[in-house]
Image: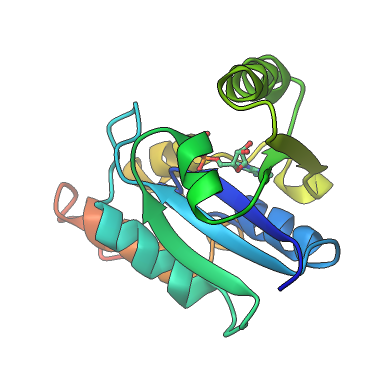
Amino acid sequence: MGKMVIYPGSFDPITNGHLSILRRALTIFDSITIAVASDPMKKTLFTLAERMEMIRESIKKDDKVFVESFSGLLVNYVVSKKSNIILRGLRALSDFEYEFQLSLMNRKLNGNIQTVFLMTDYRWFYISSTIIKEAASLGGTINGLVPEIVCKKLKEKFAVNKPENKGG
Ligand code: ADP
């Protein structure tokens, strides 16, 4: 069956940064399950179904990539998938402290599970779902930073509040 890694996150929405991590991980692991948090601590702009649909449309059909949702403790979900590896992406230094805390907490909860970090491509170093949403909400151009489907969905989402913006 090979080594399967779990890539958890809110993916609200998925960005080219997430896809960069996914592509890199595919050169190391046999398969990847993108695990979308159904009850993230933060309030999300997109529903769980929307977030999963955007991921499915963004990834090329690949029988080594799975998209699932999870709730509750991540380490329990990882065990339920018969895996012991969590994948996280690292961007600028600002990610480090939070990711360090998170992986130490997960290690405390289950010492058999390892967190693996991959560094993003320099092009996505400063890209986050949050900054993308902010720019999109103000009518900024986000083409080239997110998959096409995400661009479209963000425009739809914010067009409601900005009827003067016809997109394009
Ligand atoms: P969470 O809410 O769990 O942080 P995110 O969807 O924001 O979920 O992020 C999931 C993972 O993807 C995290 O490891 C995060 O560091 C990583 N990630 C987010 N944006 C990027 C990016 N631009 N480049 C590389 N990794 C990223």
In the rendered image, residue 2, in percent from the top left (x then y), is placed at 76, 69
Closer to the camera in the image, 141 or 114: 114
Q: If the image is split into quadrants, where does the C terminus sit?
A: bottom left
Closer to the camera in the image, 123 or 116: 116
Question: Residue 101 occupies which quadrant of the picture?
Answer: top right
**In this picture, is 116 found above or below 160?**
above
Quadrant position of ligand 1:
top right
Q: Coloring scheme of the render? A: rainbow
Q: Is residue 34 left or right of residue 42?
A: right
**Residue shown at the point (67%, 45%) measured from the top left:** 84
Q: Is residue 141 visible?
A: no
Closer to the camera in the image, 54 or 105: 105
**Residue shown at the point (56%, 39%) measured from the top left:** 128
Q: Is residue 57 left or right of residue 6?
A: left
In the rendered image, residue 152, in percent from the top left (x then y), is placed at 36, 68
**In this picture, is 152 found above or below 80?**
below
**Residue shown at the point (44%, 41%) measured from the top left:** 135
Q: Is residue 38 visible?
A: yes
Q: If the image is split into quadrants, where does the N terminus sit?
A: bottom right
Closer to the camera in the image, 47 or 71: 71
In the rendered image, residue 121, in percent from the top left (x then y), is placed at 81, 50
